Amino acid sequence: MLEDILLQHFVQYPKMEPQDAVKLIYQQEFGPEHMIKDAAKSLAALKMEIAQLQSSGAKEPLYENIGNGLCRLNLRPCRDRDIPAEDINRLFVETAQSTEGDKKRFRQGLRALEKLAEEGETPFDAVDLDVFLARYPASCPAVHHSVTYRLAYAPAYRIVAQKKLKAYLAGRRNET
């Protein structure tokens, strides 16, 4: 359930701001569909990002459930486990090609977030969320993580289908 996912992320990332929560809801609904225009360019960008990664200082899980059968595949643990960028990108592209979101469900997710904020369950104030949502375009575009979130957590991940990731990881274990 989306509310449970949000609450888990609020605990794990207490510096989340409204746009970070909206990004999570967007990713849960639409996956990475907004990210892929060209698989080769996606791979080149991924390789560059991995090459520039610095340690976050925190123990990151390999992946984090975001609901709807999707997860954030964290790049630092991938690098540490020698998971090739080509494999990460393939999972990412396949997920983008197989994920279709729905703006109505996305807006329902935003309403669930508003309810959590009104109940004091978010790390940010309900008024801050209202201000963000009042400025958020009706077209429901993807948003970036807030500066606060980027500085605190240095996020580096790709959205992938959890089932495909688990099958891939099982195959890697069987190879060794």
Image (tube, helix red, strand yellow):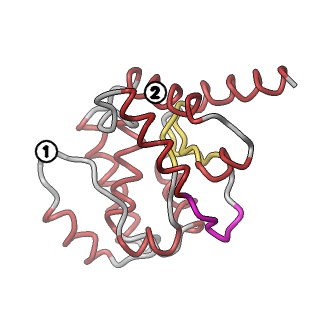
Q: Quadrant of the C terminus?
A: top right
Q: Amino acid at mark 2?
A: Thr
Q: Image height check: is 50 above or below 36?
A: below
Q: Amino acid at mark 1?
A: Ser
Return the residue at label 2.
Answer: 95
Q: Quadrant of residue 36?
A: top left
Secondary structure, mark 2, is: helix
Give x and y (percent) for residue 124. 39, 76
Q: Is residue 87 left or right of residue 138?
A: right
Query: Magenta residues, as a range?
Result: 53-59
Residue name at image x 59 percent, y 48 percent = 75
Secondary structure, mark 1, is: loop
Viewer-nearest residue: 56 or 73: 56
Return the residue at label 1.
Answer: 139
Residue name at image x 63 percent, y 53 percent = 76
Viewer-nearest residue: 90 or 27: 90
Reading the chain from its start, which is encountered first: label 2 or label 1? 2
